[in-house]
Amino acid sequence: MDKVTQLINRLQQICSALGETAMSENSVLWNKLSTIVVIGGQSSGKSSVLEAVVGRDFLPRGTGIVTRRPLVLQLIKLDDPAAQEFGEFGHAPGRKWTDFDGIRLEIDAETERLLGKMGGKVVSPNPIYLTISSPNVPNLTMVDMPGLTKVAIDGQPASIVQELEEMARQYIKGDNAIVLAVTPANADLANSDALRMAREVDPTGERTIGVLTKVDIMDRGTDCRDVLQGRTLKLRHGWVAVVNRGQADLNSKVGMKEARSKENDFFKGMQAYADLPNIGTGYLAEKLSNHLINEIMRNLPSIALYIDQNAKRLEAELKALGGDLKYGRGSMLHLILTLCHKLEKAYGRVVDGGRDGGERILDVFEVKLKESIQKLPFQKILTLKNVQNVVNEADGYQPHIIAPENGYRRLIEDGLSLLREPAFQAIEQVHQILKNIVTIAINHPSCSDLGRFFNLRAEMVANAAATLDKLRKEADLMVRTLVDMEASYLSASFFREIVAAESYAYDPSRPKPAFVTLNGELLFEKRYDTLPASDAHLQRIADHVSAYLQIVRSQLLATVPKAIVHCMVVPSKDSLLAEFQEEAAGKEEPQLRRLINESEDIAAQRDELRKRLTLLLRAQQEVAAFA
């Protein structure tokens, strides 16, 4: 049984090294360990109970709030009856206190040290860890909480009542906390702060042990037998009555041995208690020790499983942060090139993937580009008035003889000039999508290592952006060339077919070309006989130009996406960071070191994870050795 308690003591020491308490938001181990938490109102005799169990005076005394920080008290029973008793504090490893008055002074000093750093606060939830080794104590671990109060007195903040209650609540709310509720027997149980809080977190009394103090100063003719027998207020683990030293005893320097003798005489001499087993400090110490051991044995499998799971989780988190860096030139260059490859691979996957990549690019080609071209104001160019003006200006001082060829060319050029803007907009939209894909890729889990290297990450993002800017310019040039090509050379065969189809010599057995205007009308199904001759002539010119522009528009809707993919999308997948990698290969060691200068936050996070993992693995070994 002693081995069980020693195991929990070691696990709690690991908690201390982890910096965990019941108040820790992300506790890994503390809340899984069975712990006896002592709560009670101020002057309820709570600290006296602990001193009686230890058999030594070592706790601060006084009026008001004496215990101002939780005290995690670990008692270790020494096998040698003649061994010297000593205490050790978690904040002063390696030092032993054999003077218990010195222990009291150190508790006060350590309390003041912390509270002084906290701007003079009255209480703090950060515990003091004290281990007492003695042949005269049971193997036991308890947490002594600051006493509860109902009213803030002079010199105390108005919030002290709530602070003390919330602190106690945090320590006793866990399912593995054993609540030792200390209540004066000479007070009404209905007014007990300890019982009220115990009921809040343990309404069925499954985790609560009741302790009645000051039994010896109850009103004459009254006793607490009914409570001790569970008839007044039933707790599953029952009640224990104790008699502590009063102020007069303390003033008279009554020792612990004499106090225990007087306690024994009191209970034997009282008919109401003489036949009851659950009386006296000796019984309380044994009960607490046995109860704690039973709870530990019951929870040990779940503790072992919990430690294993958290160790695996921390190992995964540590792996995700990467290992320690090697600063040789070859190692650093290899790391940089590997990270570049990871980013390029993640970038390619997103480009070829769904909603954030390929689908958005396709949407530019299939929807936005089409809509932009459909909305172009071609009709302003093809109004009869504008057609007449353009034809007349193109003819100059010598009017055309048969067909206004120069007028046709100018009207077509004006129409083609409208197509440039939607094409360039499509290039910019795809360019922005690709830049966004870089951001998505760099935040992809496969590139999580980059989070360690702020400088390298920034350089990679900047170089990727520079590559995309360069490719955008190439795409701009290609698309501009496509549009200019259409303006530079008009397809004469188109107009020859129109002339042939409209001529009298056209073979009626041959189908006429299915030329369509920008409005979707078949060119050769249009009628002009209802228009005046001059208007009919101008309308034919407008419709011929419209049909020609419709062909060019359809061609550009097919070729612009091809140009963008050929000049931007595919090269970005193939060589997003090619220039950066080439530059990195030529850098010297100091320049490479600057690139992979790891973030201090990441390094600190890894060190903390490694520390926590080391301690959890130690806990894992402790549990495995016990099993």
Image (cartoon, grey):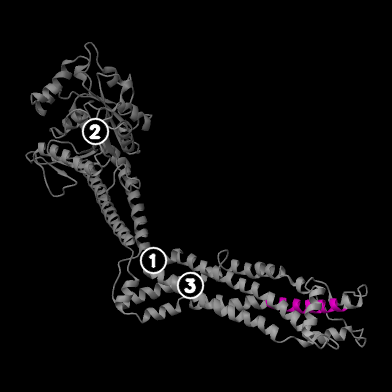
The residue singled out by tag 1 in the image is: 449
Q: Is residue 391 magenta?
A: no
In the picture, the quarter occupied by the N terminus is top left
Per the image, label 1 sits on a secondary structure element best described as: helix
Q: Are marks 2 and 3 in contact (CB under 8 Å)?
A: no
Residue 613 at what x, y percent from top left?
30, 56
Q: Residue furthest left?
A: 82
How far apart marks 2 and 1 lie (CA) works out to 50 Å
Q: Residue furthest top?
A: 221
Q: Is residue 144 above or below residue 363?
A: above
Amino acid found under the numbered disc labelled 3: Ala
Dot 2 alpha-carbon crowd within 10 angstroms: few under 14, some 14 to 19, many 20 or more: many
Q: Earlier in the sequence, mark 2 or mark 3?
A: 2
**Which label sits on residue 465?**
3
Is 507 in front, or is 615? 507
Q: Magenta region: which residues?
A: 537-556
**Which label sits on residue 542?**
none
Residue 441 at what x, y percent from top left?
48, 67
Does the image show residue 432? yes
In this image, 104 relative to 515: left or right? left
How far apart marks 2 and 3 lie (CA) works out to 68 Å
Dot 3 alpha-carbon crowd within 10 angstroms: few under 14, some 14 to 19, many 20 or more: many
Amino acid found under the numbered disc labelled 1: Asp
How far apart marks 3 and 1 lie (CA) works out to 20 Å
Rendered image quadrant of residue 543: bottom right
Amino acid found under the numbered disc labelled 2: Leu
Q: Residue furthest front?
A: 397
The residue singled out by tag 2 in the image is: 288
Residue 412 at what x, y percent from top left?
74, 80
Disc 2 versus disc 3: nearer the observer: 3
Q: Is residue 162 above or below residue 382?
A: above
